[in-house]
Amino acid sequence: MLVVVGGQAHGIGKTAVVAGLIRALPEAGWIAVKITPHSHRGGARAAYTLTEELNPGSGTDSARFLAAGARRAYWLRAAAGQLGRAAPALERLFESSPNAILESNSVLEFLQPDLYLLVLDLSVHDFKASGRQFLHRADALVLIESAATAAGKLAGKPWFAVQPPDCTSAALVDFVRARLSAHTSRPIPGGAA
C-alpha cells in the first residue's frame, strides 16, 4: 500500500505524522521517503538525488523515519519541475516492500496513492499551492490540535485531531490500519492521477 502524507504549509507536522504512523504500525514494514524540492544554484546538477538514510541519529527527517522503525528510509531531493523524472526510481523502491509512506504533496502529480492524508492547521494562514491543488484528493485530514474546532468547515472528509509532538491519535492509527488490512497486495502506483 502506498500512503502519501502532504501538508498545508512548511513545518506543519507532516514529518511527525509520518514518523508517528511508522512507530504505531511496525507490522507494515514501511519504506519511508521524504521528498523535498531544491533549486539549481551555480552550474548543472542532477534532476534529482535519492539518498538512503543509514543513520537514525543524523538529525534529518528521513533519519526520524528510520528511528521510528521504518525498514528503510530515503531522502529524495528534486529540482523544480523534475520530480516526475524520479517516479521510476520511487516505483523500484516500492517493489521491495508491500508498504511505503511518502512525505510530499507534489508527488501526487505522478503517483496515485492508496491513501492520501493532508495535514492541516487552520490557525496557520499559509497554504502551499501544492496543498491546495490536491486538497480534493485527500482521503482524510489530519488536523493539528488548534484546528480541531474548525473541523466543521471541512465537510465531506474524515478528520483526525492530533497533538504535537507525535501528531498521531488512536483513531488515525486505526483508520490507516484498516486501510492496510484492506490491501492484501498493492499494485505499483503509476501514471497520472
Image: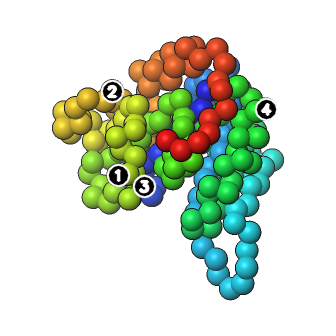
Judging depth in this view, the residue of 65 and 128 nearest the camera is 128
Badges 1 and 3: C-beta atoms under 8 Å apart?
yes
Quarter holding residue 145: top left
Q: Which mark is residue 132?
A: 1
Q: Which mark is residue 96?
A: 4
The amino acid on which the numbered mark 2 sits, given as a three-letter code, is Pro
Residue, x 62% and y 67% (percent of image)? 79
The amino acid on which the numbered mark 3 sits, given as a three-letter code, is Ser
Disc 1: CA contacts within 10 A as few (<14), some (14-19) or many (>=20): few
Q: Which mark is residue 130?
A: 3
Disc 3: CA contacts within 10 A as few (<14), some (14-19) or many (>=20): some
Which of pointers 4 and 3 lies earlier in the amino acid sequence?
4
Which of pointers 1 and 2 lies earlier in the amino acid sequence?
1
Which of pointers 2 and 4 lies earlier in the amino acid sequence?
4
Distance between mark 2 and mark 4 Cα atoms: 31 Å
Location of mark 2 (residue): 158
